[in-house]
Image (cartoon, rainbow, N blue to C red):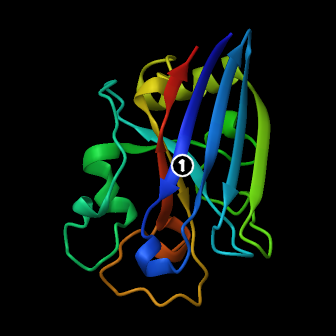
């Protein structure tokens, strides 16, 4: 059994009015990956996309901070995270093993901005799909970061905030929290 954990800290909190935070654990045991994420103080009653990001070549990913705000609009958008965090890799949705990212099957926070997510994933299926997308079956969780995304449509975002993915705009993809995944013994 191999255990990983991420302490998830706020990102863009000065602009979105909440300081989203929480934890994520990943337990690899036999042919299963159990993912547990608990978040607090996210924007309430909002769907929150959540994924791990990283570099396909295995380079270690780091969390984005306000330093990554390349266009100085006060927001760190999805595109601005890529130089330090890499690309979106595996979604934490209703079926992470399928690696189907743009859709509306992610957790929704309650009135208090809380949500809890647990999913047991068949590791061989996830590894096969991961290899098809990124060239390796090795998830290398300790070289990845987790992002939580999503703000209400009512939040006014400047036109400079990028993040259109399929039919989903920057309200859906704006990062609100991030954590470095670390192996724990």
Looking at the picture, tell me which residue is in the foreground, 106 or 39: 39
**Residue 129 sits above or below residue 36 on the image:** above
Q: Residues within 10 Å of mark 1 (few under 14, many from 20)?
A: many
Q: Is residue 97 left or right of 136 when viewed as pictured?
A: right
Residue 21 x/y as whole percent: 58, 57
Q: Secondary structure at mark 1?
A: strand
Q: Is residue 1 above or below residue 25?
A: above
Which residue does the image show at 60% across and 21% down from the upper left?
128
Q: Residue at x 23, y 60 (%)?
A: 67
Question: Viewer-proximal residue, 134 or 78?
Answer: 78
Quadrant for the C terminus in the image: top right
Check the image and report above or below for 82 versus 36. below
Is residue 61 in sight in this rendering?
yes
Q: Which residue is mark 1?
A: 8
Judge whether residue 100 can be spotted in this image: no
Residue drawn at point x = 56 percent, y = 46 percent: 51
Q: Where, quadrant-wise, is the N terminus in this rendering?
A: top right
Residue 91 image point, x, y percent: 61, 45
Horizontal and vertical percent position of residue 99: 61, 40
| In this picture, residue 126 sits left or right of residue 36 | left
* Residue for point 41% across, 68% down: 163
In this rendering, would 43 be left or right of 141? right
Q: How many marks?
A: 1
Q: Quadrant of residue 172?
A: bottom right
Q: Quadrant of residue 129?
A: top right
Q: Percent x, y for residue 143?
A: 40, 28
Would you identify the image quadrant in which residue 106 lies?
Answer: bottom right
């Amino acid at each position: 059994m191999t255990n990983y954990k991420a302490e998830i800290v706020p990102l863009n909190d000065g602009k979105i009015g909440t300081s989203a935070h929480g934890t994520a654990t990943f337990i690899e045991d036999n042919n299963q990956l159990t993912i547990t994420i608990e978040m607090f103080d996210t924007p309430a009653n909002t769907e929150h996309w959540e994924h791990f990001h990283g570099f396909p070549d295995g380079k270690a990913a780091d969390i984005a901070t306000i330093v990554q705000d390349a266009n100085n609009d006060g927001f760190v958008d999805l595109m601005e995270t890529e130089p330090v965090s890499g690309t979106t890799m595996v979604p934490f949705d209703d079926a992470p093993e399928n690696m189907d990212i743009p859709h509306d099957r992610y957790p929704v926070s309650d009135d208090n901005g809380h949500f809890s997510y647990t999913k047991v994933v068949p590791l061989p299926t996830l590894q096969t799909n991961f290899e098809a997308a990124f060239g390796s079956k090795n998830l290398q969780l300790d070289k990845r970061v987790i992002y939580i995304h999503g703000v209400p449509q009512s939040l006014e975002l400047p036109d400079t905030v990028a993040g259109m993915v399929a039919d989903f705009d920057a309200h859906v993809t704006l990062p609100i929290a991030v954590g470095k995944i670390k192996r724990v013994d």
